[in-house]
Image (cartoon, grey):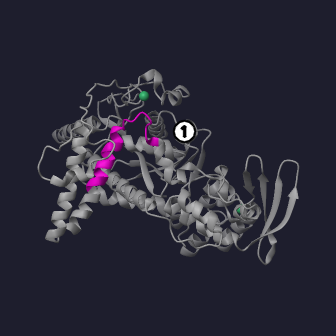
Amino acid sequence: MYNEIARQRRQILGDAARVLKKLEDMQLKDPQLYFKACHDSRGLLRNLFWSDGISQLDYRLFGDVIAFDATYKKNKYSCPLVIFSGVNHHNQTIVFAAALIADETTDTYVWLLRQLMFAMRGKTPTSIITDGAMAIRNAVRDVFPEVRHRLCAWHLIRNATSNVGNPSFTSKFRKIMTGDYEIPVFKRKWVQLIEEFGIEDKPWVINMYEEKHMWATAYLKGKFFAGFRTTSRCEGLHSVVGRYVGSRYDLTSFVEHFQRCVAHMRFNEFNADYESTRGVPVMQTCIELLERYAAELYTHEIFLFFRPFLSRAGSMRVLKIDNTNDCIKYIVCKHGRPDFTWTVDFHQEEMIFMCTCLRMESFAIPCEHIVKVMVDRDIREIPRSLVLDRWTKKVKSALNDPSGFTRDAVVISRQSALVEFSKQLAAVAAKVPERYEETRDLIMGLYSSYKAADEGENQPHSGVARSSNLYVHPTTGGSGQPSKKKKRQRCSVCQMEGHKKTTCPWQKDTDNNVIENEAIGSDDGDMCTEATAELDSNS
Ligand SMILES: [Zn+2]
Ligand SMILES: [Zn+2]
């Protein structure tokens, strides 16, 4: 018996050491990768948190709204997996960080959230969506007292099913949760619902009502959650991850396959980036100038969200215009429905629009009422005040460093995207001999010319592609200048080359925060004092 336990313990120790080695190896390619392990008093691994370079860059742009929850049975030790996720400019799910944890206590979640803040240089989100587990709520309140906290609709619907067990209730509950009601209407509908099913006394029902401000759209509208209300998002991420990781995996292969899953999600983003650059869609509404402007501004996905508002603005009427001291008030209604009105306040000087429907605040996309006012005033471009960068095509250009060097993480992720694009090409090109030769010559021609440009030489070394000079970039190719191989200094804060800690662009973020440790990704053996359990095999 003792021998068996000792054998298992040795196995676990070996596995824990291997996964840390694996992450260190990953760090060689991606120096921004941050990971942190937490051990118990016996030296067993308790918690492991990691976030790679691209995740951290994504967080800079899309870290305003984050979601996280724990899932189970995804590895050999059955320890919970926590994924911190968000939404990119194509409305795709992205991963900011992940962690394997030994238990779901408040202490563990506090540790996790502090790791997240450290990896993200102290940038706090504005909104958090979680599954509502008590330990998570306590930790969020502890670490982010100011941040809005919403409970995940998918988990609530699952809870409704398990607590009431009536499909008819579940579908009505869902409708009340997501309905765009005024608060008194919401309250009335809730009372009707629980009376209809005779569940007034159920603790779950009483508890849900007490926390309505954390899940009911009636209370949450006007707060930005990047469209996270959609219940499929959480479920979608779980099922995608489930396709990549298996319940028999040890820690090392778990991390490996999880990162493969993340790489796959990122390839989908590269694809969407490509789609968004391909021309402008056919205009469909009669407000063509605004539609065209929106098509060029927003990514394809977000444009498709916005376009229905343009169509609906066509059936809107301006009932009345009131000039007040500080703004112009537009009373807007739907054609044929003068009893339903919205008020749009327009502040001309700052070009600020505020509509009583609050959809601009909830989704950061102008509503049909604001569009109607824009049409009424003959505004032909969506004003800056109504545009959130995170939904635009150019949001990622913020990452193109002006000083010209590229972050390692960006290079790695582009590289794997090109491999995927090439795979797609190879699959169709290999079928026909002529296609194969044409593709091969193109690839090798490009390769030779880029290589020559990098080396600053006129002629490529290899004779594979004689026509390679066709592809030499006019400004960089054939200059004859040997490249400078100067060793650059590396910054200890952000690990980028070309500047020092004191001139680091990140420094501003770090200064504003309590997080002072600079040793990003350099240590992994910190002891947790509150440690009580370990990543244990329960088989
Ligand atoms: Zn509106
Ligand atoms: Zn720096």
In the depicted structure, whether residue 350 falls above or below residue 374: above
Q: Is residue 102 left or right of residue 182?
A: left
Q: Nearer the viewer, residue 71 or 379?
A: 379
Q: Is residue 119 left or right of residue 477?
A: right
Q: Give how far across and how far down residue 461 sits, in percent.
A: 14, 43
Magenta segment includes 411: yes
Which residue is at a point 52% across and 36% down the rendered structure image? 123
Query: Tag 1: Cα neighbours inside 10 Å, few (<14), some, or many (≥20)?
Result: many
Q: What residue is pinned by disc 1?
A: 124
Outermost residue, left direction? 463
Residue 101, visible in the rendered structure: no
Q: Give how far across and how far down residue 184 sits, in percent.
A: 77, 62
Stretch in magenta: 399-419
Give the quadrant of the N terminus: top left
Q: Nearer the viewer, residue 199 or 311?
A: 311
Q: Nearer the viewer, residue 352 or 63?
A: 352
Magenta segment includes 537: no
Q: Give how far across and how far down residue 475 sits, in percent.
A: 34, 42
Q: Secondary structure at mark 1?
A: loop
Residue 424, visible in the rendered structure: yes
Outermost residue, bottom direction? 336
